[in-house]
Amino acid sequence: MGYMIKPGTSWDNAYTRCLAVAPEAFDDDRVSNLWGGRWHRNGDPVPATSPIDGTPIAGPPMLSADQAAAAVRASLDRHREWGQVPLADRKARVSAVLDALTEHRDLLSLLLVWEIGKPWRLATADVDRAIDGVRWYVEEIDRMVEGRGPLDGPVSNIASWNYPMSVLMHAMLVQVLAGNAAIAKTPTDGGLACLTLASALAVREGLPITLVSGAGRELSAALVRAPEVGCVSFVGGRDAGAQVAAAVADLGKRHVLEQEGLNTWGVWEYADWDLLGRQIRKTFDYAKQRCTAYPRFVVQRSLFDRFLETYLAAVKEVRFGHPLAVENSEDPLPDLDFGPLINDAKAKELGDLVDEAITKGGVPLYRGSRSDGRFLPGQDTSAYLAPVTILAPPPSSPLHHAEPFGPVDTVVLVDTEAELLAAMNASNGALVATISCDDEATARRLGSHVRAFKLGVNGARSRGDREEIFGGLGASWHGAFVGGELLVRAVTEGAPGERLPGNFLTYTLQPS
């Protein structure tokens, strides 16, 4: 069986369309940075390749610390001007941007496929969630900002590469709707062209958006520590997040810091194996490269035989490969669970961690093969990793306590409720957790002792949309909680002495 890239979906085709839609932001040889309402052809572009097959793609134009500082100063000027724009005008402009994003939805999705390896179904979902989510805020913003005003300075956004639209662009548009200017650092590992196109459509409507690229060590002084910045919003790993947390704590700056945690799925006194099997397969969406993925199953030992039977049947149905590979030109794009990891280095790192964990005593329950994937003839597959499952990862392995951010599951067996809870709290805080248990009262009793912000009973939890709030406990979150009205409260000023719901250094306040 031979595959080819579906006609009309090549990287060259996508980039040519970007040149036609937003020539002010894209050149034949590079993309530009955006600040002060204008596109600037500066910064040194670094080479980049697509994780899906090694195709060369546009690389981020890396700014120096001084250039980033100039961009932040310009954003403060825009912030002060934008704060005087009436809410009705802000709503109209943001709505116009959403209409433009809708018009170019398929191109934005195709860029996500090439830049971060999302299968078509998940790429379009990322774009659609951003558009639909912000439309809801446009409808609800009046009540949310009543009695509140914009911050003293712009909101600085530093986010990981996995959700450029539904997390990063969504947040920026809501921040602007609430009366702030928004600054974003392009994730170095992917999302440059997609975010550039979306920002080009936004700045045409006069939105005060800044989009810059650069190394974190070069830009942190401007994007985190600069006095012009009114709030820092960070989504990423704990190591980088700890550095941001230390900086904002020293400065007393408003902050929203979403960090990783080992999200766990407990199985206790449970018998609905058909339901669990469907849920297990879905946990592999986007190769578990998301903050609400479930890479750890904590299973009652007496149920392990039924769990293993269910798990293996589910994981063997997982489909992965080149997201744009078709047999015939008229075929639809494949409905895959995942494509590549974000790059070949991450695939190698995870492969090495798996080998180390097994060498030290972990039991391999399942090891898929790259040959099971759907690939083009002779394609570079170095960024792909087939699903792997390890029973009882050794305590010395990072897989024992940290989120792998890839299609690697670990299973831990327990005999008592106390062991179940200890295993589910292995990473000192998480964003989500689930307990599968036939008795809901028992599940909720146990769940009250799990240090996760959201608890699912017999079902997965996610970030959520619209009204649903989002946060984390323990080391998985620092600062204000978000989602629904809380996202607007996090980036606006209320009454003097207001205590925002969140997980702060000096207090933790759950929303009422």
Image (cartoon, grey):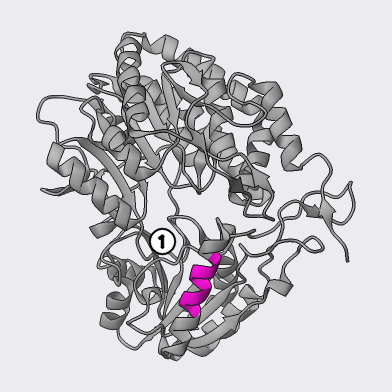
Q: At which x and y percent is residue 269? A: 41, 81
Identify the magenta region. 347-354
Residue 7 located left or right of residue 209: right
Q: At which x and y percent is residue 113? A: 65, 46
Q: Which residue is mark 1?
A: 456
Quarter of the image for residue 85 reads: top left
Residue 435 located left or right of residue 275: left
Image quadrant holding the N terminus, namely bottom right
Tell me the residue at 76%/43% (across/down): 10
Q: Is residue 350 magenta?
A: yes
Depth check, front residue: 57 or 456: 57
Tell me the residue at 44%/57% (across/down): 292
Depth check, front residue: 248 or 291: 248
Tell me the residue at 43%/49% (across/down): 463
Quarter of the image for residue 264 reads: bottom left
Q: Secondary structure at mark 1?
A: strand
Q: Residues within 10 Å of mark 1 (few under 14, many from 20)?
A: some
Tell me which amino acid carries mark 1. Gly
Camera sees residue 283: no
Numbered disc total: 1
* Residue 70 sits above or below residue 427 on the image: above
Tell me the residue at 37%/79% (across/down): 397
> For the stretch drawn in magenta, what is the main secondary structure?
helix
Residue 141 located left or right of residue 329: left
Q: Residue furthest front?
A: 44
Q: At which x and y percent is residue 99? A: 60, 21
